[in-house]
Image (spheres, rainbow, N blue to C red):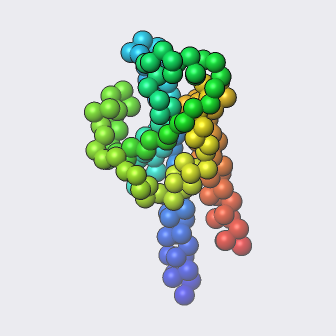
Amino acid sequence: MKLLFLFLLMMHVLHVYSQIYKTTILKTPIFKLFNFHKLILVENSREQYLIDFAPVIDITKPGNMIKLISNQNVEGKIYVYKYDSVDEHNYRKSIKQINDKINDEIVSDIVRDFSTSFNFYSNNCCHFCSYCEESIDKINNMAPSNLLCEES
């Protein structure tokens, strides 16, 4: 009986720690000149997602760029790319599949809860990456405490 209990406890520990997520911020160029745009790579033991938040409008058009610079809110969209493997230095060639449906519930919740109203100064790709990192940190910090509560 004790052996079975230890086995089940060990399986639970492995399951909890397999859910820990790692995040990496990737910088990409805007207009092929400035590395200001940021994407976030979120990975766990099963899957990897590259998540991008950007305005839907074409920012190469002067009128649209003026909207952004003049602090107007424009429609934004969160793009989720699922990877089999990621080369952080050349991630564009690593894309295997683009998913509208995210298989990971935690990543799906994080993406769903962020406002998609894009503002160049107050709700942009940098804010999105910070939001994702903070959300993932909270989730990762909860995993060991959940385990301790269940052991006692």
Percent position of residue 17, x then y: 53, 58
Q: Position of residue 16 (x, y in %)?
A: 55, 62
- Residue at 64% in and 18% down: 70
| Picture quadrant where residue 30 is located | top left
Is 58 on the left-hand or right-hand side of 110? Answer: left
Tell me what residue is drawn at x 46 percent, y 22 percent.
59
Residue 108 against residue 2 in the figure, above or below: above
- Nearest the camera: 10 or 90? 90
In the foreground, 29 or 5: 29
Residue at image x 52%, y 81%? 3
Residue 116 in view: yes
Q: Residue furthest bottom?
A: 1
Quadrant for the N terminus in the image: bottom right
| The quadrant where residue 6 appears | bottom right
Q: Residue at x 54, y 48 (%)?
A: 111
In this rendering, the answer to whether 24 lies above or below 12 is above
Q: Is residue 20 visible?
A: no
Quarter of the image where the C terminus is located:
bottom right
Looking at the image, is 61 positioned above or below residue 40?
above
In which quarter of the view is residue 123 placed? Answer: top right
Tally of numbered tags: 0
**In x, y percent, where is residue 52?**
47, 36
Residue 17, placed above or below residue 37? below
In the rendered image, the residue lying farthest to the top is 33
Residue 14: % across, % down: 50, 63
Spot the residue most to the front: 63
